[in-house]
Each structure stands twice: as C-alpha cells, then as structure tokens.
Image: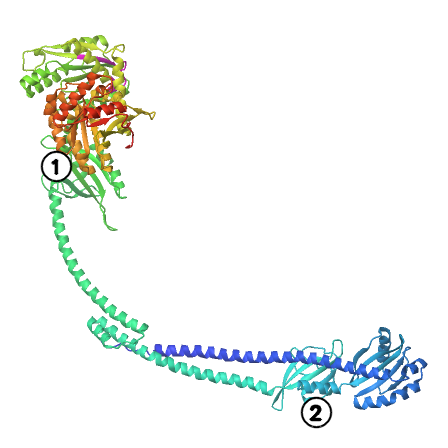
Amino acid sequence: MTPPLRPRNFLSIRWKILLLAGFVLCVTGGLFVWQQYRIELRQFDQAQAEGQVRAQELVQRLFKLQADRLQMQALMFAGLPNVRQDLIDRQQGSLERDLEGLWSELNMGQGLLAVSIYDNHQQRLAGWGEYGSAQQSRMAIAAERQERPLSWLECAQQCAYQLVTPISYRGETLGAIAVTGNLENIILDLRQLIGAEVAVFAGKPQRTTTPLSGMSLLSFSGGTATQELLNTAIHRSWQKGQVQLGLDNRIHQLMLVPVSDGLQAHLVFATDVTTQVRAIRAAARRSFWLGCVALLLGLVLLYAMLRPTMRRLQHVTGLLPLLGEERFEDVRKSYRARPRGRFPDEADELESLAVILSSRLEGLRTESREHLHDLAAQANQLERERDLFYSLFNTAPVLILTYGRDRRIRMANATAHELSGQSSGSILGQDFADIFLDTWQRNGYPQELAGMMSGNVYHGESNRLQPDGTVRDIVWFHTRLAHEAGETPAYLSVGMDVTEHRQTKHQLHKLSECDAVTGLLNRRAFKRELDALLTVGEQGTMLVCDLDQFKVVNEAEGHEAGDALLQAFAAYVETLTPTPRLMARLGSDEFALVFSELNSTDAIALARQLNHIQPQQMARLQTAQALSTCVGMVQFPMHGQDADTLLGSAQFALLQAQDKGHGSWHLYSADDPQRDSMGKRAHWKREVERALEDGRLVLHFQPIRNIAKGTISHYEALLRLVGEDGKLVMPGDFIEAAESTGLIRRVDRWVIEAVVAFAAGRPEFKVALNLSGRSFDDDLAFETMKAALKRHGVKGKNLQLEITETAALANMSKATRVMAQLRGLGCAFGLDDFGVGYSSFQYLKELPIDFVKIDGSFIRGLTSNADDVMFVRALNNAVQGYGKTTVAEFVEDEATLALLREIGVDCAQGYLIGRPAATLI
C-alpha cells in the first residue's frame, strides 16, 4: 500500500518538539540571566546603601572627634596663666598678650580659624581670626547658662565647625571661650577612610529627587573632574540619596549624607564604581552566552534522543497500512525483526500496541467469520423454529387467533377452526367476538381493545355451544402484539378449553368433600358446613344414626354387601320428609342428618321412623330383613354453638341410645349425669389441637439406671403440655381425650418426630418413648419413624419404643406385625406397665420385645409387702428367663433400690434416680 502524501504544511513532530523546547529553553534561560543580573544589581545597591549608612555614621563620629578636639583646644586657652584673672579684671589687652603665642601655634598646627573670649555680659573681650558672629555671641551666653560646651556647624561663604565652652573659677562662670575649626581635616579624613571624593553643600534639600538643586557647593576634593561630576549631579534624579553617573568612560556613585540632624550642610561622596558595574555587566553577558551554548547543546541532545524514537514512530506508521490489508503476520514479523532497547519507552509501547492491535484485529476477523457462520446457523435455526411454530400453532390444544382493530380474524389455528363449529378456513375475516364471545362480553370488548393498546392483558371466559349440543368452557387471554410505528396494531387471543379440567376438578372436589361409597358429605366437609350454618344463627336438630346390622352384614356377607347396605340407607334418608339440610357419613356405619327448624317432638318422631326401617322402604336393599338404627339427637344452638361440641354431644346421645339396645333413640340433655365428662373431653380435645398448632407440646426426660453398674442406661421421653397460663399439664389429663377423639395419632407423630430430632443432637444417649395403641392399627408408626430416622440421620438402635401391655394385646396380630417392622429399623421394643393387664407369660414369648417395665403399683410398697416381693421376684425371673431386660418403675428410696438389686432387677426408674426434666441430668 502506497503511503499517503504529506500535506504542504506538514511539520514533523520532531521539529515541533525542538521548536517548543527551544522556545521554552530560551525563555527560561533569559529569565534566569535577567534574574541573576537583577540579583547582582540588588546586591550592589544594597552594598551602596550600607556604605551610605556607614558614611553617615563615620561623619558623625568625625564631627564628634572634631568637637572633642576643639574643646581640648578651648580648655588649653582657658587654662593659661592669668586668663581667669584677666577675665575678672576685664583686661582685654592682657588677654590678647596671654593667648597670642598659643594662637599662633594652634592656628598653624591644628587648623584653627578663630578664637574669641566673651565675658559674662556677652562682650567679646579678645579674639583672633574672622569668626565672631552674633550667633557665636548667643551660643556663648547659652553655654554660660547651661554650664556645658556647645558645638555647631556654621556655613556662610564656607563652613566652619565652632565650639563654645564656659570658663569658671571657684564655682563662678567668668565668661566663655569660642574656637572655630575648618572642615579640611574632616574632609581629608573622610576621603582617606571612605576612598571617595567629598564635597560640602550648604542649605537644605528642597526635593528628594533633585536634592542638590537648592543647595550651594562650598568645597570639594578631587579637582575639576569632581566639580564637573557635581554640576551634572545637581540636575539628575536621585533615589534614596544616591545617583549613578558616567563621566569620561567612568561610572561614579554619588551619596548624599547630612552632616547632622537639623544642620543645613550635607556631604556628597563620589565613588568610582566602574569596576563593580562592569563586573556585573560582564557576568550577565557570560550567563547569556552560557545559556545560548546550553540551549544549543540541549537542542542537539534532544534531537539525538528524538531521532531513534521518530524512526520507530515512522516504522509504526508504516505498519498501520498493513493492518488495513489484513497482513497481520507481516506486522508481527516486522516487530520481531527490530532490536529492542534496554530501556523501552512510549514508542516501544506503541509498537507493542500495534502488534497487539494486529492480534486483536485478527481475532475480530476470526470472530466476525465465526459470527457470520453463527448468523447462518441462527438463520437456519429461525427457519426450524418457524416450522416448529407453525407445527405447534396448528397442533397445540389451545385456540390461537390474531385480528385487527376491526376484530376481523387474520390467523387462526386448527383448534380454533375446530371449536368454532365451522369448516376449515371459513372463520378467517369474520368477527372474532361474534364467533367466540358471549353477548355480554361482545358489548364490553371495545373497551378491552382500548385497554390493550396500552399493553394490558385481559382474560375472561366464554361458553361455546358445539354443533353436537355440548357446551365448551373456554378461558381467554387477550393482549396486543408488538408492532412498529406506523403499522396497524394487531391483537392476540389465546383460548384454553377447560371443560374436561373443570369436570375433573369437580370430581376431585367431590371426592375430597364426599364419601366415596354413599356420595354424602364426609366428616370434614360436614363439620365445615355445620359451622357455617351455626355462624348465621340457624336453629334445628341434628341426628346421628348408627346401623345396628352393619357389622354383621359386612363380616358375614362381605364388603360389597356392607357397601350396598350403606348406599341403600343413604338413598333412604334422602327421601325423608322434611328433607335433611345436611347429610353426611361420619364413620364406617355412622351417619349425621341436620334438619332446620325441627322441634324436639318432630325430631323424636323422625328418630322412631329411623329406628325401624322395613325392606320395602329401601329399594336398593337386597334382603328381606328389616334394618334398625340407634339415633342420638341434639338441638342447636341449645346444645352447642360449634360443630365439635354438637358432634360430641350427639356422640354422647348415640352412646346412650346404644346402651338401651338396638332400634333406640336418645335426645341429649344438659342435665345428663355424664355431661361433665363429655365437656371435659371436648375441652382437652381443643387444648390438644391448639397445643399441636401453637407448638406447646414439650418433652421431659427421666433417667433410667442400670442397677448393677450404677450408671445411666438410657432416658425416657415423657410428654408434657404447656397450658396457656404457662403451667405444665401431665399427660393423664389429656391423653384419654386424645385417644377417644382420634387425636392420639397426631400426638404420636409429633412425639416420634421430636424424639428423633433430639436423638440426632445427642447420639451418645439412648432415648425411650411411649406409643399409643392406635399407632398399631396400621403402618402409621412405622412410616413416621422410618421417615424421621432418614430425615435426621439417626440410627434406630438409639431409640427404645414402649407400648402398654393392654394396648399390645388388644389387637395382637397387628401389634406383632408393626413391632416387627419397627424392630427392623433397629429400634428396641418393650412392654410398659406389665403386671396390671392380662399378665400372661405366654405373650412374652410371642411378642417381639426386648425389655419389660414392671408396673409401679408393685414397686411402691415393695419393702413392706411380702406378696409384692414374691410377685416381682417371680415376674423378674420369668422375664429374664425369656432373655428380656426388666425395668422397675417408681423407685423412690434406697431401701427399694437395694431390694431390687437383691432380686436381680436390671434397671430402675423413679424419683430416686432422677425427676423428669427438660434437659438431661
């Protein structure tokens, strides 16, 4: 692939970087040089300012030295002989003669300009030189008054330093002596100490920028060059008392220093700073040229660094067209052929990214090809799904139709054609609602169509009359199909023929609510319907009938004859007048009839009619023998306001009738002697039901000791009921009611589940539990135990099951079978309360048991009753003779335990061993 032509204004990245770097380096270098130059200048200015301060301090010190020198000279004059006496005598001529010699010496050697002597009346008595101004006279008086020397600088045509000191004698001021010195010595000292030319200006500066413009030049050093420099400085602008001037290729720094505060005289120092200034400028030039050299070297180095990088970038740009040509392998080969540096940079990363990009693009190309292959496969799949859709559409056992807003059918499957009652294809284009909806549904369908426009789903039902006269129930679901903008909306309706489903549901409901033999209500449905009648305040009578001959017929002639008798009786009661409001089969041969608004007299008449039924009155009965029934009657709501209470009272009345003999009746009375026991039974039945529902049944555990070993053999789980007041209820209060009402089977299931769950958490202990005799009527106990052991992962060997002797022998064949099944799970079995029932040792041989529990009635008085000792000894020997273990109950003292040990009983249980508790002892 030919690389693209570069545009005319193309500028390489290399040059862009070099130009930018050069610009940045120039700016930063220039700023650096300028900053260094500024720093040098600031340092120079600071040094000049410090020199100005030092010069001012030096001037003040020199003037102070001048004052001290003048004072010494004045004291020399005042100390000459006869001076004080001449002052007292005011002898002017004598003073001049006394001082003339000293004056000549000081004038020539010390540079004095004048000496004057004043008396204490401001009268000048003697003097030498030209100074004797009025100010000097005033200063003399001031010195006399202050009794101290006074000095000042006085400038006229020239400046002179004057000092006045008082002359005292014996505590009295006689006058004053004034001496005047020139400034030549001070100027020479300053020139020598500072190394600068010095000029004296008289006057006070008027402006800070041109301080010399209003002042007079009195004297200077350095000749005409200094004078020319000072004349130039008068008109120049000064800053902070300094100015820099150039003269004859030399640079001078001038400083203005006041002689003293308040004195109108200033000194100007002119210093030649040519060397310093030129050195600063030379340093700036050196920095500039060094910066230029550094810039050039930096650009050269940067160019050298960028060159290989730019070559790699050019190499990468050369690889990019190969990617467009899908020459991915060439890209990777080119990358592998180039040497790698020790320190990779972004250009290397860009090359790596180009290689990665080639791999990604190659992968995308592969994926795109695979995607195209997948799209082709999906297209084939869509075709198959379309075929499947049409197959399902035409074979699905539901009605599927689509139609527009005008309700004209556009598409319909075979089921829709079939249930329409018309020939295939004839319903297309017809109104959907006219064919499949009822009249009242057609009237409201436009509103449903409007609702479906917003995406709602509607469902309803219709009854479709078929050509064969049958009516089909169809459940419909209506919704709007998705469509693109601008398309005409379409609707989908799916109908399901639920005729058979509802028939089956009705049959199942009937089976769950009705007795399978007679078609009457079963007990559960009857109780619900009866409670409903009582809730609305219905009044009437309920009759509970028991067929006297049913067991005889069922056992003698077989179950079919028994079922025929039940069906005949059910058909007969349907013909009674008045017609029963409710009819139900409660048990095997027990029926319940409910009559509304039936008084006791009519109820008794009806009961007598039911007591004796002739064969001709029951068309289905295939026998010539008359049928008799026992009838128990209760009135509602007098005898109860709920179904359980009424049924309990009716059962009690039926028992009373059966006690009278076949073909008898009994009307329940609240004054019946046995009414309290019936009420108590109903109360405990309700308590047990509520306890099962509320989880108020609990287990307590009592230990059983191995007498010989003195250790705990196992624990017995004892059932307790927690009352609504929180108190424990013993099983003796509620077990009888549970057994008589059939609740004992639910209680047994709860006990099995609870004990197995407990054993799962304490596998090191064995637990015994009691089962009622009702659990052995069928396989309930076995199936419940098997499921619980599997669910909790417990081994059957950890459980010991107990059944009373009476319950086991009541139906020995069933008990033996169920006990064998439970022992097959690994559970041990034992007889509880042995000795108070049949107590036949033959049963010990026949029953599959592992241990026997001797009833506590023989243990309580064991230590005081020899007959009990003899019986327990014989019973223990017999049981152990069959290889069984014996357990003595109600062991409450050590004497009884010792006697049992002597007899040889294996285990003991009782309060001595441990009381029942919620936790293991």
Q: CA distance from mark 1 to mark 2?
A: 142 Å
- Residue at the spot of label 2: 223
Which of disc 2 and disc 1 is earlier in sequence?
Answer: 2
* Helix, strand or loop status at disc 1: helix
- The crowd level at tag 2 (other Cα within 10 Å; few <14, some 14-19, many 20+) is few
Left or right for 774, reference 731: left
* Residue 289 rendering spot, x and y as whole percentages: 47, 85
Compared to residue 701, the image places residue 179 above or below, namely: below
* Residue 30 rendering spot, x and y as whole percentages: 49, 79
Of residues 300 and 69, the one nearer the viewer is 69
In this orientation, does residue 305 appear? yes
* Residue 100 rendering spot, x and y as whole percentages: 87, 89
Q: Amino acid at mark 2?
A: Gly
Of residues 801 and 57, the one nearer the viewer is 801
Q: Amino acid at mark 1?
A: Leu
Q: Are marks 1 and 2 in contact (CB under 8 Å)?
A: no
From which residue to which does the magenta span run? 631-645
User: Residue shown at 14%/40% (left/top)?
Assistant: 398
Whether residue 639 is in magenta: the answer is yes
Work out which quarter of the rendered image holds the N terminus and state it: bottom left
Q: Which disc is residue 419 wearing? A: 1
In this orientation, does residue 465 appear? no
- Total numbered badges shown on the rendered structure: 2
Work out which quarter of the rendered image holds the C terminus and state it: top left
